[in-house]
Image: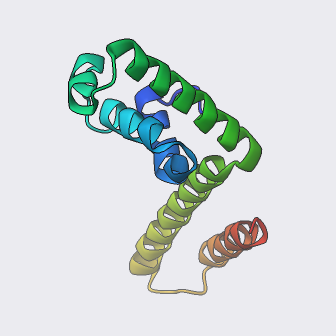
Amino acid sequence: MDKAMDKNVEISLLLSFYSSMLTSKQAEAASLYYNQDFSLSEISENTGITRQGVRDSIKRAENTLYDIENRLGLMKKFLKIKSRLSDIDDMLKDIETEITKSKNDSSLKTIEKIKNIKDIMKEINDSY
């Protein structure tokens, strides 16, 4: 996982990928806690589970989510794709600016950036 990523955001993302692999009680408790910012007491009141039971369920869900991510790595791949697509977007913006300034789309800089875009797209395509 990304060390800079807030744990709440990380767990929320993991839930979006893997919540169906949790028990219904784990998925519900973790979703209420991480996605809707409910307290343990509020979840306990809504689900009829003791506060300690809610806490245990959330901790088991966290462990399961991290274990599944370590095995499958879907979130890691998703975040890498998202980052690389952002890189592509930045390059395309640069190309648009250069073409607008030079009105010559065959400039060497433009051609090099197009090559970089194709390389990134190939990298993304090859990863799946």
Q: Nearer the viewer, residue 13 or 82?
A: 13
Q: Nearer the viewer, residue 64 or 48?
A: 48
Q: Position of residue 22 (x, y in %)?
A: 54, 43
Question: Residue 25's quadrant in the figure?
Answer: top left
Q: Quadrant location of the N terminus? A: top right
Q: Position of residue 14 (x, y in %)?
A: 52, 43
Residue at the extreme front: 48
Residue at the extreme top: 52
In the displayed structure, 117 sits above or below 50; it is below
Residue drawn at point x = 53 percent, y = 57 percent: 82
Residue 69 visible (yes or no): yes
Q: Position of residue 85 (x, y in %)?
A: 54, 63
Residue drawn at point x = 72 percent, y = 50 percent: 72
Residue 1 visible (yes or no): no
In the displayed structure, 5 sits above or below 39; it is below
Q: Relative to 59, is 51 on the left or the right? A: left
Q: Position of residue 78 (x, y in %)?
A: 59, 55
Task: Count the numbered circles shown.
Answer: 0
